[in-house]
């Protein structure tokens, strides 16, 4: 069933590197544990809203990701019970000011600008996340094309791992990393993140 977000999230938790081929593309080792970071709820926009290119930033990138919407409070949950805590799935674009990510050496500023977290077009409640086609189109041209079967860490593992660090609340969003093929966007570009079974998240850069 396709539904809307139940409420605004209190937090948005993301995994930094979770596709084998993307790790290879970056020349990085496969991580032994998920690398976590946060985006503020103030960065959230929906499908059809504009991504604002911040003044003074030199490069912003798209990152197509499968997002998990939390159903109920989750603290120290077992991997085998994680499904009980999932309301559904959505498309997320982890927009990143790449030059600032490199310059700052940590990710908060680069990931947190207003409008840097497009999510949508809906929450799909009836979906198996283990083998979904995930794609990015920039001005109609395909830029990322992968499958969640390339995940390093499964959705259930990630939720259990995060819940042992911080309590997840109903409506919180967990994003599962981006596949290979990341690249920059310019003002005027139209970016589409499409995930099998969910639909297309469409935004324009202004
Ligand atoms: Mg990302």
Image (spheres, rainbow, N blue to C red):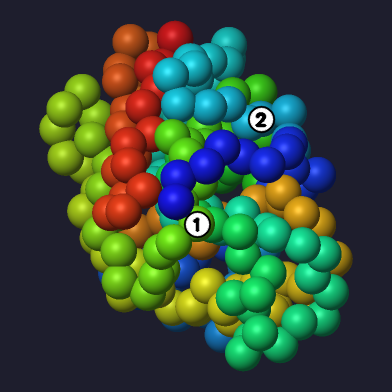
Q: Mark 2 = which residue?
A: 43
Q: Residue at x 62, y 40 (%)?
A: 5
Q: How dense is the environment of label 1, judged by Cα within 10 Å: few (below 14), some, or many (20 and up)?
A: some
The numbered disc on residue 203 is none
- State the residue lying farthest toward the front: 1
If you read the primary sequence from the N terminus, does the residue marked by circle 2 or circle 1 appear first?
A: 2
Q: Residue at x 30, y 71 (%)?
A: 131
* Residue 92: percent from left, percent from top: 48, 43
In which quarter of the view is residue 165 placed? bottom right
Residue 19 in sight in this render: no
* Residue 12: percent from left, percent from top: 69, 48
Q: Is residue 156 above or below residue 173?
A: below
Left or right of 191, for residue 108: right
Q: Nearer the viewer, residue 106 or 195?
A: 195
Q: Mark 1 = which residue?
A: 125
Locate the C terminus and report the quarter of the image it occupies. Answer: top left
Q: Is residue 117 above or below residue 125?
A: above
* Residue 91: percent from left, percent from top: 44, 45
Q: Is residue 187 above or below residue 44?
A: above
Left or right of 62, for residue 174: right
Q: Residue at x 66, y 85 (%)?
A: 81
- State the residue lying farthest toward the left: 141
SS at mark 1? Answer: loop
Measured in 3D between alpha carbons, the distance from the residue under mark 2 to the one under mark 1, in whole angstroms, is: 24 Å
SS at mark 2? Answer: helix
Q: Residue at x 30, y 20 (%)?
A: 190
Q: Is mark 2 within 8 Å of ligand 1?
A: no
């Amino acid at each position: 069933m396709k539904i809307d977000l139940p409420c605004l999230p209190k937090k948005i938790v993301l995994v930094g590197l979770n596709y084998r081929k993307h790790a290879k593309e970056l020349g990085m080792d496969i991580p032994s544990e998920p690398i976590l970071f946060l985006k503020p709820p103030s960065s959230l926009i929906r499908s059809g809203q504009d991504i604002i290119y911040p003044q003074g930033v030199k490069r912003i990138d798209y990152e197509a990701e499968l997002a998990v919407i939390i159903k109920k409070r989750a603290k120290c949950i077992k991997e085998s019970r994680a499904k009980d805590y999932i309301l559904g799935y959505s498309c997320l674009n982890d927009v990143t000011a790449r030059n600032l990510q490199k310059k700052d050496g940590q990710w908060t500023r680069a990931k947190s600008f207003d409008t840097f977290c497009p999510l949508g077009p809906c929450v799909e409640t009836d979906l198996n996340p283990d083998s979904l086609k995930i794609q990015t189109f920039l001005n109609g041209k395909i830029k990322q094309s992968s499958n969640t079967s390339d995940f390093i860490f499964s959705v259930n593992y990630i939720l259990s791992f995060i819940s042992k660090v911080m309590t997840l609340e109903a409506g919180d969003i967990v994003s599962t990393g981006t596949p290979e093929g990341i690249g920059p966007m310019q003002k005027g570009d139209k970016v589409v993140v499409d995930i099998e079974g969910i639909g297309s998240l469409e935004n324009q850069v202004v």
